[in-house]
Amino acid sequence: MRLEPNPFSGKKRAPYPQHRRSPTPPTLAPKVPPDPSFPYFIHPHTDVITSDPHNNVTDHIFEKIGYNLHKRPDHPLGIIKSVIESYFDEKYGQDTFTSYDSLYPVVSTYANFDSVLVPPDHVSRSQNDTYYVDEDTVLRCHTSAHQLEMLKDGARKFLVTGDVYRRDSIDATHFPVFHQMEGFRVFEQAEWEEAGKDSVDLAAEELKDCLEGLAKHLFGDVEMRWVDAYFPFTEPSFELEIFFKGEWLEVLGCGVTEMKILEEAGLQDKRAWAFGLGLERLAMVLFDIPDIRLFWSDDKRFSKQFKEGMFKAGGVDMQKFKPYSKFPPCLKDVSFWLPKEGDSFTENNLCEVVRDVAGSLVEEVKLIDEFENKKKGLTSNCYRIVYRSMERSLTDDEINSLQEQVRSDMVSKLGVELR
Ligand code: PHE
């Protein structure tokens, strides 16, 4: 299973392979810390698709807002969420950690980036990576966007689960909307004094103990390892990997919270840890779900296989997902010259065009050939688009007309020259 290219993790600073053009450079100035009335929540009636020049939200993405798969008790994501919440109840006592799962996904750039110290030139701020509603407003790309507002609201131990949005390539494990859970715990001075420990050491040790326990709870007696990582909002930072079916799988990022964030919340005399994990990743592994699009499927053959309470600790003897027969894929290749100038063509932009035309009928978009014509000074790419429905057979006519639309949008929106 391919690892999530995590734009926040320093280990994979360059999330895109070399052949892809560099993302649009960020043109957006960072916001200065807001006055207290600066809105953290943007109310649901705010238009998400607007004519603002920064707006890059497509209909396909807009339709996903409000689905709240993580709030459905019989959905695999809802099941994993409540399993993790009950782990925290068991470990720390009922309701010690407060759970939030209804925070609106449209947030300010301040909340999404500045409040968690994401630098002004960080790749995640680019319009190639993030969905912008307008210059100051985005679809959150991680649940860390809520850390500071929760602290300012007085929360000290909390879990925040929600849908997050990232412009990304398309394949079986990547979808532009997925779900994360954030955990946050604040320590009082008395706690590290009582333990006779340095505050950072106490927080880091307790964090690792908590998350190793969670991994055992979910995966049973697995081999796991800690990998040093980098996040702008934590220091030290770690990633937890587990050895599952022959490979090391990154399951979460975490670390000891940067004091600057606590200071901003008036908690300069405290310490804290934070973690963030992807629910799809965990659910795919635990239930053996082969394709991330299945989470969005209405097909009864999918939904009837999941029931609240079906999870057994350690995944032992748990009912796995039984794949039903797949409908045949339909492959279409498109060859084109990249525009000579500008960066209107990126793989993410191409995926967005394809997704906007074909929605969840597109299974994969992959580069299969690339060459340079030195004389012409042009680069040619050939991409293969795999169309497949999870629910039915697709007709040739239907696919041909989708592909025609994709081709013409590639010319008008991405400035490529078809070959
Ligand atoms: N927000 C990070 C991500 O999306 C995960 C994270 C959360 C890491 C909290 C450290 C602390 O990749």
Image (cartoon, rainbow, N blue to C red):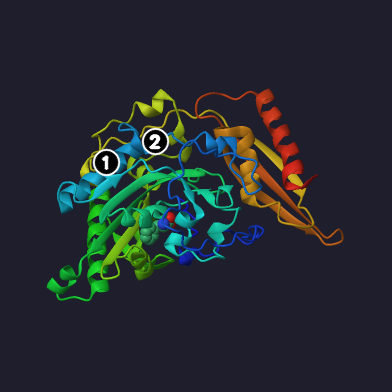
Where 394 sits versus 88, above or below?
Answer: above
Picture coordinates of residue 320, whole percent (x, y): 32, 36
The residue singled out by tag 2 in the image is 69
Q: Is residue 277 left or right of residue 134?
A: left
Q: Is residue 397 left or right of residue 87?
A: right
Element class at badge 2: helix
Q: Amino acid at mark 1?
A: Ser
Where 1 sits versus 312, above or below?
Answer: below
Q: Quadrant of ligand 1?
A: bottom left
The residue singled out by tag 1 in the image is 82
Disc 1 crowd rating (10 Å Cα; few below 14, some 14-19, many 20+) is: some
Whether residue 248 is visible, yes or no, is no
> Which of disc 2 and disc 1 is earlier in sequence?
2
Where 192 sits versus 20, above or below?
Answer: below
For the residues labelled 1 and 2, the Cα–Cα distance comes to 12 Å
Q: Quadrant of residue 75?
A: top left
